[in-house]
Amino acid sequence: MFANLVRVALVLECAAWSALGLWLSTSHGWGVSTLVAGAVAGAAGIRLVLVGLSLGITWIARSPRSPQQRLDFPAAVALVAGEWRAMLANNFLWLPLENLVLRADPPLAPARRRPVIVVHGYFSNRGTLCALVRALDAADTGPVFVPSLPAVFAPIESFAEHLDRVVREVTEATGEPRVALVCHSMGGLVARAYLRACGTSRVAALVTIGTPHHGTVLAAMGAGRNARQMRIGSDFLAELARSEGESGPGCAALSVYSVHDNLVAPQDSSRLAWARNVPIHGVAHVAMLGDPRVHRAVAAALASADSRPAG
């Protein structure tokens, strides 16, 4: 369970800060309050540096932007601050406390509305999706189910097999023949791999948020086979696109992405020729999940899919 790995990592980080604090206390006489403040600032500062590095790398590899999409200094500061806040929440709350920050799934019982399955991305779990799920619940969407994918570094195809089991379980239990898939980051590739293997007979709509459909330069720094599959020009991505053809898998599709994404670059990698593409700006990869513009776009796409006749 990924949450357990995150908890272990946080315990080790705390141990490292404690060891440093003990040395500073015995060697330099630092007080407890100073040490605690320094550890908190250090932990937050490391994550700020990581956000800055990712933004710098993806700025170098960025897609062309229109003048309207360029940020002035205050907007750039807000972008960094927003992603930093999201990263802190993700590291210290959403990931390690996934089942506390996000309510349990609804009962698997007959439903009167189309179910929605929300799929998380790389190196993540269901907790990361808490803000998005709350927004979908508030919009009276669903029932909304949020599985945590098994393993961490497995190939995307294995995640697609797990998604297949979840889709079958939800459709059979609810009596609704088709679901909508809402996917963040790598989750969009998991859904596309599932659609390639299983078709659209159980899927009415696909929504992706910040998905590297054509790869990302940062995948070269990731670990695991799934990261290698997200590299630009990978065999996985090429075969996925070839199997879909020009018209895609055959269900309604929306891709929401940020032209300032700090983990997907070039950012137009999130565009799909066979989907409706909605760019937003001024927000980065993890912070997108809490952005009201994303929430409205996703809710509208789900409502539109619900209004279409089955078939």
Image (cartoon, grey):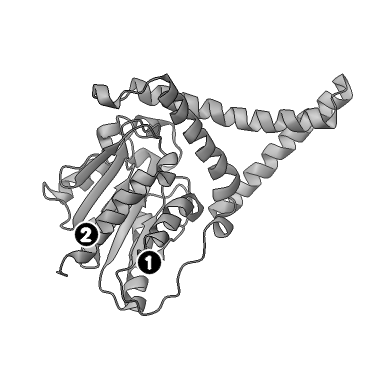
Q: The residue under label 1 is which amino acid type?
A: Val
| Disc 1 secondary structure class | helix
Quarter occupied by residue 282: top left
Mark 2: which secondary structure? Answer: helix
For the residue carrying disc 2, how many other residues have a C-alpha within 10 Å: few (<14), some (14-19), or many (20+)? few
Considering only order in the chain, which callout, 2 or 1, is on the residue closer to the N terminus? 1
x, y (%) of residue 43?
Answer: 64, 32
Quick one: 292 or 245, which is closer to the camera?
292
Residue 21 position in % (x across, y down): 79, 29
Give the vertical position of 88 relative to 308 (above or below). above
Disc 1 residue crowd, few under 14, some 14–19, many 20+, Cα 10 Å: some
Rendering quarter of residue 218: top left
Residue pointed to by mark 2: 304
Q: Which mark is residue 129?
A: none
Q: Is residue 260 left or right of residue 198?
A: right
Q: Is residue 110 left or right of residue 46?
A: left
